[in-house]
Image: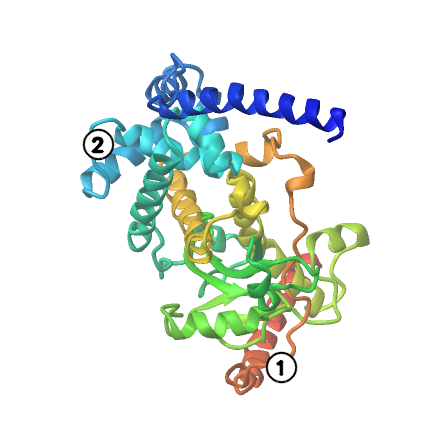
Amino acid sequence: MDRNYQRRSQNEDEFILFVFPTLESSSSQPSTKTPMHTSKLSGASRVQEILTRHEILSKRNFRMELSVFHALVHKLREKQLLTDSRVVSVEEQVAIFLYALAKNASNETLADFFQHSGETISRYFGAVLDAITQLTCIYIRPPSLHPHQILRRPKFHPFFQDCVGSIDGTHMPMILPLEQQEPYRNRKQTISQNVMLACDFDLKFVHVHAGWEGSASDARVLQDALDHGLVVPPGKFFLVDAGYANTIQFLAPYRGTRYHLQEQGRANQKPRNYKELFNLRHAQLRNHIERSIGILKMRFPILRTGSHYPVDKQVDISVACCVLHNFIRLHNGDMQWPTNSNDELDPEQVVEMPSGDHNYNSDIQRFNNSREAGNQKRDAIAHQMWEQYVTHRT
């Protein structure tokens, strides 16, 4: 036999005799888990530190003022939607949820920040999400039927006295399994849900219709909203953009005529006819929904990045953010801060979304049947407005 083979075989035997007992002895020892979340600064301590220091810390981490945070916690306790557990107070439960919205934080990031297990974080995130969506019927209410004070200004009165608010569709990113993506692919070829939002002239949302696929038209989402809770009181109307049909309930601008305020500004000239004047006044009022959506998305960055939650939770998150927006507005929260604050999101995280539909594609027969009546109503308002405008101008 080859001596080199004999020597190699003897060395291998010695190695096995040495290693196997070592492995055996180590495997026979009882396994011990090393605690992971052992920071001296617990989640409760972190929350307490934020809530007792400068107001800006609460805005950065929880997207609302200290007083609004405490009011929210009080409301959730009062409605018995959340209760303190043995280890996690309602304050910390709410903080976990709001921090996730503010940072689009993963479960792992939240676990590290609040020093809890991933299972605990997931449980309380879900509990707070469910609690806030249960407040929807309290804080997202139909608009007032009394004309808003802004409509009493000479340039709007009496032409828009029956207007109760404005409507727009907005896309919010979603993260979905590959096999579910196609219906949610929008015209920018990104994945989103198309959410219909209606607001009043106090920048409060009066209706939210979430969950439609990004490929759906704004008009189709509006039709579905009318079938599921959106009510336009008799004689009243909302302002909409060119992506919707012009009807007696939803007044749209004249197409083929300057509309957006930036277009009007660039033209640097006064309206030349009744259509331009109507579109100018229409844009000035409908700007409220654009402002509301802008504030909403800047306040809650998760709405600009998408999240890895199940589809139903991603839809619920968009509704919960609208509830929180209204809650903050009702408690005199700062509506300017979100758009003026530094954006902490990595630009690469922000998903490019399409704006609302540019034109109505005559795809909803229900709206097509009332377009003629809508055109007559719009013409009557526009001509009356133009007559007053010319009289005062001369």
Placement of 380 over or under 291, stated as above or below:
below
Which image quadrant: the N terminus? top right
Crowding around mark 2 (Cα neighbors within 10 Å: few <14, some 14 to 19, many 20+) is: few
Going 35% across and 36% down the picture, which residue do you hit? 331
Q: Nearer the viewer, residue 240 or 377?
A: 240
In the rendering, at what x and y percent does residue 307 appear? 52, 47
- Residue 334 in view here: no
Position of residue 219 relative to residue 196, above or below, is: below
Instruction: Using the image as rendered, state which of residue 102 and residue 336 is in the foreground.
Output: 102
Q: Which residue is mark 2?
A: 85
Q: From the viewer's side, name the closer residue of 130 and 230.
A: 130
Pointer 1 local density, CA inside 10 Å: few below 14, some 14–19, many at least 20: some
Q: Nearer the viewer, mark 1 or mark 2?
A: 2
Left or right: 288 in relation to 37:
right
Q: Amino acid at mark 1?
A: Ser
For the C terminus, give its image quadrant: bottom right
Above/below status of 205 relative to 117: below
In the rendered structure, find residue 362 and report the number of the disc placed on it.
Answer: 1
Give coordinates of residue 251: x percent, y percent: 55, 70
| Residue positioned 19% across, 39% down in the render | 78
Q: In this rendering, would 119 be left or right of 173?
A: left
Residue shown at the point (64%, 43%) measured from the top left = 350
The label number, if any, that marks residue 4 in the structure image = none
For the residues bearing labels 1 and 2, Cβ distance under 8 angstroms: no
